[in-house]
Image: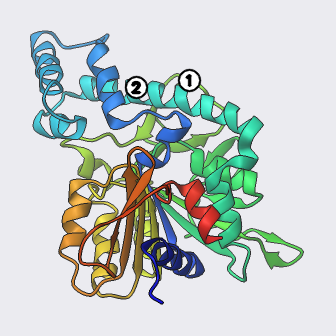
Amino acid sequence: MSKTPVEVAVEDGQQCLKSVPVIVLGSGASIPLGLPSMADLARHLRASKPKETRGHQDDELWNRFVTALETQDLESALAEIQMSDRLSDHIIDITWQHVGAADVKAFDGMIINGSQSPLARLYGHLLNSTHRTLSVVTTNYDRLAEYAADHAGFCHYTGFTHGYFRQRQIDPRITFTQNHQSVRTIDIWKVHGCLDWFMNTDDHIVALAATRSIPKDFRPAIVTPGIGKHERTQREPFRSVISGADGALMHANAYLCIGFGFNDSHIQPKLMDRWRRGTALLVILTKTLSESAKEMLAKATGQQFLALEESPPDGTRMWSHRYSETMLLNNSKLWDLSDFLKHTT
């Protein structure tokens, strides 16, 4: 008897988890916990007003930016307009404050409901084996990946030492030991920075875990979309973090992408290169599959993939290398990580 599409989806999902995949987190992984989407952030920036500008030129640039957001997404608008340093600082500050406020609420919620975190359950399942490390690659600024690691009872490494005042870790990575044995650790590669990374006036980067505001004489070390994005990521700590992410992506046997839109040049090249060689299974869970992801899957020639997106009101639409057309899974929420784990673990 041939397998149903749901059985095929579960089987491939189980195969992905068995391979201990690199987890790729996009903004869609954080939105269910109250973090803003790019569209939410764009609306928040439109409503903001820079406090310090250099007269008419900055005012004109900001008005152009606000007008562009009426018809374009945030990344497109920022890629079109070369912002001044003052306006760029304003965008970074507003982004940090808006995402940071939501991150704090998510943290407070996880104090009560952390044991229900699907990401924490995923970590626990993947490291309930002989594997000692797990890699997460993310474009998100929030700390949900770190909170989930703590709730799951694992150490995590983000490129900094541990503590409240953390310094850059010069060695490639920290190896934590207990009773003369390395402990299970989650490497979290945050290619666009993190809410608790800051740079002082001497360009010295530190990570301040407890702060809920931007410290005096420090700037948030996050990379926002725009013309200067690639130039900023050539500096430390981003260069080392991207190198760590590249290493994880290049050696993966599988990828589990959660809420990732496949629109980021810092993650896709290494992932796509290995996947196109047909040596890694790609699984995508998302509320809405992006057009770039659909185009990528449509061009697949022999690669293994499973993509699951929401099909309202209560179904899942599946793309799979096993079928020539998309399949509708009725009465199924396999696209959601929590439901996915119920069926595959």
Q: Residues within 10 Å of mark 1 (few under 14, many from 20)?
A: few
Relative to 112, does residue 161 appear above or below in the rendering? below
Relative to 32, does residue 136 appear above or below in the rendering? below
Residue 39 in view of the camera: yes
- Picture residue at 50% right of the left edge, 55% below the top: 333
- State the image coordinates of residue 80 (x, y, percent, origin top left): 11, 37
- Amino acid marked by disc 2: Asp
Relative to 14, does residue 37 appear above or below in the rendering? above
- State the image coordinates of residue 42 (x, y, percent, origin top left): 29, 28
Relative to 82, does residue 242 appear above or below in the rendering? below
- Picture residue at 15% right of the left edge, 24% below the top: 70
Residue under numbered circle 2: 93
Q: Quadrant of the C terminus?
A: bottom right
Q: Earlier in the sequence, mark 1 or mark 2?
A: 2
Is the Cβ of the residue at disc 1 closer than 8 Å to that at disc 2?
no
| Horizontal side of residue 207 vs 329, given as left or right | right
In the picture, the disc for residue 285 is none
Residue under numbered circle 1: 213
- State the image coordinates of residue 149 (x, y, percent, origin top left): 68, 55
- State the image coordinates of residue 28 (x, y, percent, origin top left): 42, 47
- Amino acid marked by disc 1: Ser
Q: What colour-coding does the image apply?
A: rainbow
The answer to which of 153 and 172 lies nearer the viewer is: 153
- Picture residue at 22% right of the left edge, 43% below the top: 228
The answer to which of 85 and 211 lies nearer the viewer is: 211
Q: Residue furthest right?
A: 179
> How far apart, in angstroms, are the residues tagged by discs 1 and 2?
10 Å
| Horizontal side of residue 240 vs 343, given as left or right | left
Callout 1: helix, strand or loop?
Answer: loop
| Horizontal side of residue 188 vs 60, given as left or right | right
